[in-house]
Amino acid sequence: NVLVLKGEKGLGKSAILKDLYNKLDKENFTVLGIKADKFYCKSIFELEKKLFNDQLTFNRIIKNTEESGDKLVVIIDQIDAMSLTLSSSREFIETYIRLISILQENKNTRIILSSRSYDLKYDAELSIYNSDIYKIISVNPLSVDAVKNTLSKFRINCSSAKVLELLRTPNHLDIYCRIFERSKERRVGKECR
């Protein structure tokens, strides 16, 4: 009941999870989204206090969904922020690992994680999710044709192979198009070199 979304920085993992959260919410699933990079907590209790202001606990949410027969979907975005490469304290990642372990015990709960590929492979705690027992979906860069198609919608002509390669990362493409949009009144005949 764990799905892992993995990929490099800027490929759109968070955007995918945000869209998924909105879709599940509209379809009346019980869904909880946690941006791990915003909640550095040393215990599940501390995480509950920060998330729910003493109004709820994870156990209460699990019990409510079990009693109603509903499915609970917990999305934990950027769990790699707790990794050794970004955080010196292992307590933070251990809190999330314990939470995932508790959530996994409930058959009506689905857990979706996002992580950068490197941390998923090399971090001692996160690497347990880089296994065949979990469903892993890789987020890959855009194709050059997809980049050219997007640029054409903004009337941007780009023939530089290096720039097109850079723009295969969706975040880079988004920033690039926004820059051109803001400056289009000042420029005529937009073209990258």
Image (tube, rainbow, N blue to C red):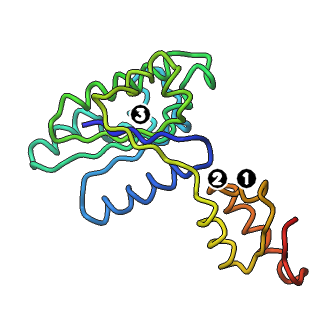
Are circles 1 and 2 on residues that touch, CB within 8 Å? yes
Question: Of residues 54 and 71, which is closer to you in this image?
Answer: 71
Residue 150: percent from left, percent from top: 63, 71
Q: Quadrant of residue 135?
A: top left
**Residue where numbered disc 3 is placed:** 49
Name which residue type carries label 2. Answer: Thr
Residue 169 - label: 2
Label 1, label 2: how far apart the Cα atoms are:
6 Å
Name the residue type under label 3.
Lys
Q: Quadrant of the N terminus?
A: top left
Question: Quick one: label 2, few (<14), some, or many (20+) residues within 10 Å?
Answer: many
Q: Is the C terminus in the top left, top right, bottom left or bottom right quadrant?
A: bottom right
Name which of mark 3 and mark 2 comes first in the sequence.
Answer: 3
Residue 124: which numbered mark, if any? Answer: none
Q: Secondary structure at mark 1?
A: helix
Residue at left offset 49%, top offset 42%: 35
